[in-house]
């Protein structure tokens, strides 16, 4: 599977390229996403790797369902700035590399107005090239928090389910398991999961 970021964007900035490659591995990666912020009285989410270490976080110090959120690594470095555009009734989210909202978005997520159970929730474009159609699709699996992300060819990229204990008991709708396929930039996948959390009013 090709890396999830476009070649043209990858080569346009050495800093963004090296940052992205840090989050691409040759094996499937599993994460736990807790739809809570570790900041007291904050809103957001916290992402743990399979070893239990914090790798990503979203800390929104304002109200829930903010129009602007920032995906950071553990040290606080902003990886993606996400902004909701109020141009359409169903919403559109633009993602920018690093901090700020200058220039063209690196990706855009549009809600599907035909959405129903089992249908595509959102279409994802990289590089904002509308002529090539959506690059990825986010599809609801069931009524709970389960959904999957696939490429425009139908290849599975990542899957999100409610996290369960070894005995099969769920931890709640705000604790999720994220599985990301090999050679996929999982920081980008977490950015998409963050947008899904905003859509579902979970952060």
Image (spheres, rainbow, N blue to C red):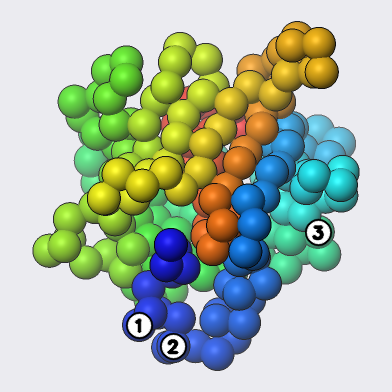
Q: Secondary structure at mark 1?
A: helix
Identify residue for label 3.
74
The front one of 160 and 57 is: 160
Q: Is residue 75 left or right of residue 153?
A: right
Q: Secondary structure at mark 2?
A: helix
x then y, percent, for residue 2: 42, 67
173 relative to 85, above or below:
above
The CA distance from mark 2 to mark 3 is 26 Å
Task: Decide: few, some or many residues near mark 1? Use Cα within 10 Å; few <14, some 14-19, many ≥20.
Answer: few
- Disc 2 to disc 1: CB gap under 8 Å: yes
**Is the Cβ of the residue at disc 2 closer than 8 Å to that at disc 3?**
no
Number of residues whose C-alpha sits closer than 10 Å to that of mark 3, classed few (under 14), some (14–19) or many (20 or more): some
| Relative to 105, 185 lies left or right | right
Tell me where residue 104 appears, x and y as whole percent.
34, 72
Horizontal relation, residue 49 to residue 178: left or right: right
Q: Is residue 14 visible?
A: yes
Residue at 21% across, 29% down: 113
Which residue lies under the disc numbered 1?
8
Q: Residue at x 56, y 33 (%)?
A: 160
Q: Earlier in the sequence, mark 2 or mark 3?
A: 2
Residue 19 in the figure: left or right of residue 92: right
Instruction: Tell me the distance, in whole angstroms, between the alpha carbons under discs 1 and 3.
Output: 28 Å
Q: Which residue is mark 2?
A: 11
Tell me the CA gap for discs 2 and 1: 5 Å
The quarter of the picture where the C terminus appears is top right
């Amino acid at each position: 599977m090709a890396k999830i970021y476009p070649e043209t964007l990858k080569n346009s900035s050495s800093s963004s390229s090296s940052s992205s490659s840090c989050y691409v591995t040759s094996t499937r990666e599993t994460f736990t996403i807790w739809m809570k912020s570790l900041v007291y009285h904050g809103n957001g989410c916290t992402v743990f790797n399979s070893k239990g270490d914090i790798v990503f976080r979203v800390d929104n110090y304002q109200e829930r369902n903010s129009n602007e959120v920032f995906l950071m690594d553990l040290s606080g470095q902003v990886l993606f700035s996400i902004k909701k555009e109020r141009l359409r009734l169903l919403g559109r989210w633009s993602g920018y590399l690093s901090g700020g909202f200058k220039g063209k978005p690196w990706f855009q997520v549009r809600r599907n107005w035909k959405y129903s159970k089992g249908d595509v929730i959102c279409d994802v474009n990289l590089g904002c090239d509308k002529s090539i159609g959506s690059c990825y699709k986010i599809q609801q699996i069931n009524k709970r928090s389960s959904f999957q992300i696939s490429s425009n060819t139908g290849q599975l990229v990542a899957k999100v389910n409610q996290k369960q204990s070894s005995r099969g008991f769920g931890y709640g709708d705000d604790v999720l398991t994220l599985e990301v396929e090999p050679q996929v930039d999982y920081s980008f996948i977490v950015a998409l999961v963050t947008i899904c959390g905003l859509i579902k009013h979970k952060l």
